[in-house]
Image (cartoon, rainbow, N blue to C red):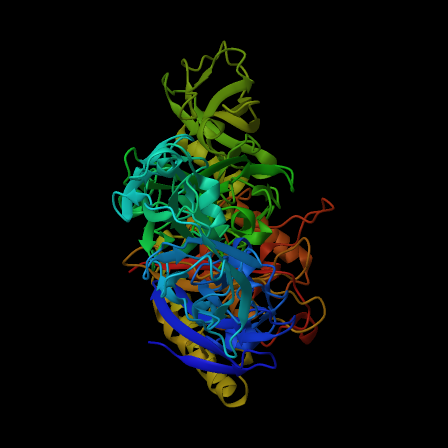
Amino acid sequence: MYLFLFYPSALVFPVMIVVLIALCFTDGALSQIRYSVPEEAEHGTLVGNIAEDLGLDLTKLASRRFQVVPSSRTPYLEVNLENGVLFVNEKIDREQICKQSASCQLNMEVFLENPLELFRVEIEVVDINDNPPSFPETDITVEISESATPGTRFPLESAFDPDVGSNALRTYDITTNNYFYLDVQTQTDGNKFAELVLEKPLDREQQAAHRYVLTAVDGGQPPRTGTALLVVKVLDSNDNVPVFEQPVYTVSLSENVPVGTLVIQLNATDLDEGLNGEIVYSFSNHISSRVKELFGIDPRTGRIEVRGEVDFEESSLYQIFVQAKDLGPNAVPAHCKVLVKVADVNDNAPEITFSTVTESVSEKAAPGTVIALLSVTDRDAEENGQIHVEILGDVPFKLKSSFRNYFTIVTDGLLNREQADSYSVTVVARDKGTPSLASSKSIRVQVSDENDNAPTFTQSVYDVYVTENNVPGAYIHAVTALDPDVGQNALITYSILECDIQGMSVKTYVSINEETGYLYALRSFDYEQLKDFTFMVRAKDSGDPELSSNATVKVIIVDQNDNAPLVLAPLGKNGTAKEPLPRSAEPGYLVTRVVAMDADDGENARLSYSIQRGNDNGMFRMDWRTGELRTARRVSAKRDPHQQYDLVIEVRDHGQPPLSSSASILVMLVDSMAEGRGVGDKVGTSKAKDGALDLTLILIIALGSVSFIFLLVMIVLAVRCQKDKKLNIYTCLTSECCLGCSSCCSRQGRSRKKKLSKADIMLVQSTVNVSGPGTAQVPVEESGSFGSHHQNQNYCYQTKHQRTELSYLVERPRRVNSSAFQEADLVSSKDSGHGDSEQGDSDHDATNRGHSSGADLFSNCTEECKALGHSDRCWMPSFVPSDGRQGLDYRSNLHVPGMDSVPDTERGRGFASSFRVDIPETA
C-alpha cells in the first residue's frame, strides 16, 4: 500500500513525494518509508518527519533511543533525533552523486529500541534542469565529397547533458538550408545523437564551405539549449568509400579480462587503389570518454582491444562507434557500431552489514526475540549474486528473512546464563557462483542474568554437635548456600526462622551471621536440661523478586561429666544410714543396697560401687554393679569384737575425668532381727513409743479423718466458689492451670483416687502475670498427657524471691484450714508414702524445718497430705539460696488459691518466673 504525503518547499521543486511501505516481522517492526527531494536544495530544507509519518509517539523517541544506523549516515541529510525531522544538511548535486544514472537514491536507516523497530528511509534525489546541453567543441567540421549522393549520412559529434530523464538532451536542430537536414536517433542506452543527411548534391566550384548553427535542446521546462558552429567543407571527388561487413557488431566480453585482450577485429574494404583504397580506423567523434578509456583501436588493422579494467558492476553494455576512412583526397568515412556485452564473473564476495546489534539479551527472553538486524548484498548478477545466509555452530539463535536482503537474528529457544553467559554468533553469506565466494562476520551476545535460581544449601539437614557448658557467643557451625546467579541475584543473606524452644524464642539460643552463615550459641547449654533442639535457617538472595530456600539445623548437645553421682538410698540422719546385721548372718547376707543416680548420660552416668574404708577385716563385699552390700563371711566374736562397722561407700561414674560421691553406713551387730527392728525404731521412728498401738486401729482412725476432712473441704470450696463467681473470679484466673472454679471443683473428686510419688511430678514453665513491682512474664508451655489412660492435673507455682527461691502456685480444689492439718498430723505424722518413717526420714526433716520457721503460712499442706496418706502429692524440692544458707522449707512456697490466710502483701509481691507441675491421674 502506498501513502503519498506532500510537503511544500520554498525552492524550485514545488512538491516532495513520500511513499510509506510497511513491512513487519516477529518481535521487531521493520518498515520502509520513501521521500523525494530536489537536488540543489539549501541547508535546512525539510524533507519529512519520519516519526510522524510512521505514526511514532514523539514523546518516547528519547526514552527509546531513536537514532540513525551509523553505517547509513550521509553528509547530505540529517535527522533531528528529538522530533524525527529529516532535513537537508548539505546542498545535493545529483550529477555529482549519481552521474548519468537514471535513478539517484540516498538510503538511511533509523531504529528505536525497547522493542527493536528498524525503519529504512529511501530519499530519491529528483533531478532539476540545472544543466544545458553542451558540445565537446564549439566548432564542428565535416568534410563531404562533392560527389556524395543525396541521402548520404554523416554522424555528428553528440552534445552532452548531465541531467537525466525529461531534463536530458531531447533533440537537435540546425539552421534551415537547402542542402542538409538532421536525423535524430536514439541509442539503446537512451542517449540521442544526430546524423547530417545530404538532401541536395554539392558543387565545390559553386560553394566550397557551408556554415550552420547546430543546436542541442533538452526536455526541461523551460528547455535549455547548447549550440556549436557546424562547418561543412566540400571536397574534390573520391569515387569509392570504405564499406564494413555489417553496420552493427555484437561481442561478449568477460569482466576483469586483462589489458590487451582482443574485443573484435573489424574489417572494412575500399575498391579504390593506392591511397584511395588504404583504410584508417578510428572512433567516431560522439563516442563517450569512458569508452575511450576502456577500449582502444588500431588505426591500421581495426583491432579493438581492452585498455582498462572492464567491470560488469559498472556497466554491462558498452557501445563503440567506429569509422573507416581511406587516405585518398576528399575521403568519405564509413561508420559501424560495436556492442560490447560484459559477462559477469563471480568476483565479488557477499557483503554483510549489521545495522543494529543488541549487546545483551535477558536469559528469560522469549524465543523469537530480535538480537540483531543485518543486510547482505552481492554486486554480482544472476547466480553469482544469489546468496545463502546461515549461522555457524550450535547456538540458540537463528536467522529470519525480513524483506529484500535484510535478515534478523532471533533467539531459537530459552537461554540459560548459568550454562553459557555469552555467545559468539557468526553469520556466513555464500553466493552460488562458480567458484562460490563467501564472507562472514561475528558478533558477541552477552546473556544478562535474571533471578531464576533460588539459593541452595549444601545440605538439607545440618547436624551440629555442641558440648554442654559451652561459652556463650561461641561459634558452633556454619551453613552454606550457593546461588548460580550473579551480582545482586547471588548476594545471599542468612536468617533464622522464628520458633520456640522450651517456650522461648530460638533466637535466644542461637544467632547467625547474615553474611557468612556462621552460627553462634547465645547461651551455655546444659545437657541435663536440653538434649537437642531443631530450627530452620533461611538463605535469601537480593534479586527481584527475592528467592529463598530453607534448611534444617539440628543442634545436639553432647554430654559432659559435670554431675557427680547422687546417693538416693539408704538415707539416714545427719548423712549416716544405720543398718542392723544379725550375728547369725550367713556369708552373702544382704545388709543393704546402695542406690545412686547420675544426671549425666552414657558412660558419664554408668556407676560403680565400692567400699572406700571401714572394711579392713574383710567382713563385707560390695557388688560394684548393683550396689548391694553383703557379708563376705560369718560374724566371728573373735574377729569382730566391736559392735558396729562404720563403712564409707564410694559411688564413681565412668566419665572423663570421673566424679564420685560417698555414703556413710553404720552397720550394727545385733543378736536377732527383732532387736534390729527395735534399734531402728528407737533411732529413726516415733512408732517405738506407741508399740502397743495396733496398726489396724491407726488405719481406721486415718480413714475416718480423711473422710471427714474431704467432706469439710467440699463444703468450704462450694461456698467459696459461689461467692467468687458472684464477686470476682480473680483467684481462678491468676492460675492458668484452671479454667474456672467449677472445673477446679469438678476435678477434685478424681484427684483423690490416686497415690502420687515424686516421679509423677514434672516442672514445666508457664506464664503468670502478677501485678506489682518486679513483675515478669514467662511463656506458657502446655504439658502433654502421660498416657492414653492418664489425665493431667495442673499445678502452678510462683517464685516468692525473684532470683534464688521458687514459690509454687498449686491449684487445689480443696480448702483445708490449718487446724485440720495439725489434727491429722497427730494421727500420721511420720508417713512418707513409702512406709514407716524414722527420725532421719526426709519427710520428718522437712516437717521439722517447716515448724521451726514459725512464719510459714503454707506448711499445713504437708500436714494435710500426711493426714490423707498422700504426703508425696505435696512434695516439692527445697531451694538453697545463693549465699549458701539453708533455704526455707518447700512448704513455705506452697500457695493454695482461695486461702484466706494469705496476706495481701504476699499476694502483691512480684516474681520472675513460674512453673507448672503436671501430675498424671491414674484410673
Q: Is residue 822 visible?
A: no
Q: Position of residue 6 (x, y in %)?
A: 48, 82
Vertical placement of residue 417 versus 659, above or below: below
Residue at 46% in and 77% down: 17
Which image quarter holds the C terminus? bottom left
Residue 888 horizontal/vertical position (percent):
65, 54
* Residue nearest the viewer, comparing 9 with 77: 9
Residue 600, placed above or below residue 650: below
Residue 683 horizontal/vertical position (percent): 54, 38
The image shows residue 246, relative to residue 229, as above or below, that is above
- From the top left corner, tell me how far across and down residue 913 is, in percent: 61, 60
Viewer-side residue, 516 vs 612 = 516
Q: Would you identify the image quadrant in which residue 524 lies? A: top right
Q: Tell me where residue 257 sits by quadrant.
A: top left
> Is 919 positioned to the left or the right of 507 in the image?
left
Closer-to-camera residue (553/918)? 553
